[in-house]
Amino acid sequence: MSIQATELAEIISTRISHDLIGNIGAVGNAVELLEEGDMDFLDDIKSILKVSSGVLNSRMKFFRMAFGLDNSNIEDEEQVNKISQAYIKTIGSGANNGISLKMTLSGKKLYREAMLSVMILVDTIIRGGEITITCDGNGVAAKLRSEKGLSAEKIATLKTIWNNVYPENKAIYAAGIYLNERKNYHGYTITQTETEGLELYIR
């Protein structure tokens, strides 16, 4: 059953806030150290500001394109790929998180669905994995392979989401719920398989 637009907005806002608050706090702490004037921590402060501002910038760009109003960037294959790759690097241990992403994009109609698929698959990863996204005029194929394993609980919950049954902790699954609501609105289908990892097919 579809949810109210106001609740969907609350779910997405909560998830975005959760994913940004840690690095916002880190920037705030670094500024406090600067204000105290203790230069012994200057190198640490510079490192905190560089890392945290980079994460915030990458995540905000990704969230704006995945959840925000339509804009010209969502039609740009290179930009979608670049911003999705940058988002991947903000997860876990950053560039060394063991997560790789390969995107092949055409048929701009479903670029937003492709980006949401990236976020959904990343959320199921326990440690490291290979994500392949193929988006063309016929649909999106999103595949995840991980030798370290995936979250069985989250994979099972995704199956219920595609059947319009949403969990209590909705914010964790904001990308999946939003994708499902778009499915309901636009009239396409989402098929999930787990033969060699996790695969989503959007048609």
Image (spheres, rainbow, N blue to C red):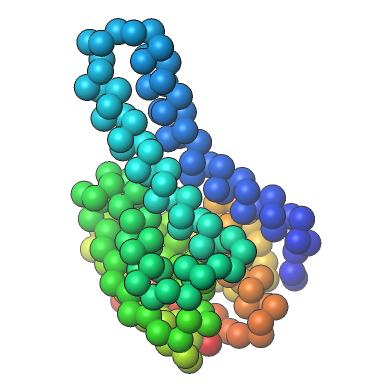
Res. 194 in view: no
Viewer-proximal residue among 102 and 61: 61
The residue sitting at 24% across, 50% down in the picture is 95
The residue sitting at 35% across, 72% down in the picture is 78
Dividing the picture into quadrants, the one containing residue 176 is: bottom right
Image position, residue 73 (x, y; %): 47, 68
Dividing the picture into quadrants, the one containing residue 79 is: bottom left
Image position, residue 80 (x, y; %): 40, 68
Q: Decide: is 175 above or below 203.
A: above
Numbered disc total: 0
- 94 on left or right of 163: left
Image position, residue 150 (x, y; %): 36, 60
- 82 on left or right of 44: right
Image position, residue 28 (x, y; %): 45, 24
Res. 116 in view: yes
Q: Residue furthest bottom?
A: 138
Dividing the picture into quadrants, the one containing residue 42 is: top left
Viewer-proximal residue among 187 and 112: 112
The residue sitting at 47% across, 33% down in the picture is 24
The residue sitting at 42% across, 15% down in the picture is 32
Image quadrant where one finds the N terminus: bottom right
Viewer-proximal residue among 126 and 152: 126
